[in-house]
Image: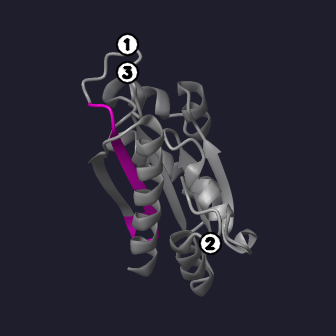
Amino acid sequence: MFPLERDELATAVGEALVARGARVAVVETTAGGLISARLLSVPGASRWFERGIVAYTRHAKQDVSERAGAILAEHGAVSAELVTELAERIRERTGVSYTVAESGIAGPRDGRRSTKPVGSVVIAVASPQGTRIEEHVFAGTRVRVMTQIAQRSLEMLREVIEG
């Protein structure tokens, strides 16, 4: 899942945040806490990690943003609109410089009606410069999809922090 010793990417994110005197917050759905776990595996993370939220259910997403219910109804859970809202709302509520939010479908299908394929994910990184969004379709097992979401989310976060 992630390295048991030293997570180089998470360490680099932490160093970039410290260099800028910045903090980060995370809202995860499909990754289920893997993004936060990787960040928190870095010694000294308390200097730059504000919080991580696993907002898996509709109700949990609405706890992050009152608008989430309407966005889910109109655009669905795997949408740029929802992920942008989650990233921007948690940034506003916490006062941190950077936030990451993601939502996707790790699979296997459970009978729900989404037209998006298993492995679909939308990732957003909100910063003082705005919000960057990416959409991906990752292949593999449920755990592999979750791992790839965490990896790409941290890569995006590092890219946005480093400009």
Which one is in front, 123 or 10?
10
Which residue in the protein does label 2 denote? 6
Question: In the image, which is nearer the foreground, mark 2 or mark 1?
Answer: 2
**Could you say which quadrant of the image residue 144 lies in?**
top left
Residue neighbourhood size for the residue with mark 2, other residues' Cα within 10 Å, grouped as few (<14), some (14–19), many (≥20):
few
Residue beneath the point at 62% across and 72% down: 6
Observer able to see residue 92: no
Query: Which of marks 3 and 2 precedes in the sequence?
Result: 2
Left or right: where 125 falls relative to 3 = left
Could you tell me what secondary structure mostly forms the magenta stretch?
A: strand
Picture coordinates of residue 153, whole percent (x, y): 44, 58
Which residue in the protein does label 1 denote? 111
Tell me, yes or no, whether the highlighted magenta stretch contains residue 120.
Answer: yes
**Distance between the alpha carbons at the discs numbered 1 and 3:** 6 Å
Label 3 near label 1: C-beta < 8 Å? yes
Which one is in front, 72 or 138?
138
Name the residue at the bottom extreme.
Answer: 19
**Distance between the alpha carbons at the discs numbered 2 and 1:** 39 Å
Provide the secondary structure element on which disc 3 rests: loop
Instruction: Relative to 101, say whether 116 is above or below.
Output: above
Tell me, yes or no, whether the highlighted magenta stretch contains residue 121.
Answer: yes
- Colour pattern of the rendering: one colour
Picture coordinates of residue 42, whole percent (x, y): 67, 70
Name the residue at the front extreme.
Answer: 4
For the magenta stretch, what is the residue range?
Answer: 117-130
Residue beneath the point at 39% across and 25% down: 108
Query: Which of marks 1 and 2 precedes in the sequence?
Result: 2
On residue 109, which mark appears?
Answer: 3
Which one is in front, 71 or 2?
2
Residue beneath the point at 40% across and 54% down: 124
Observer able to see residue 88: yes
Give amino acid for label 3: Arg
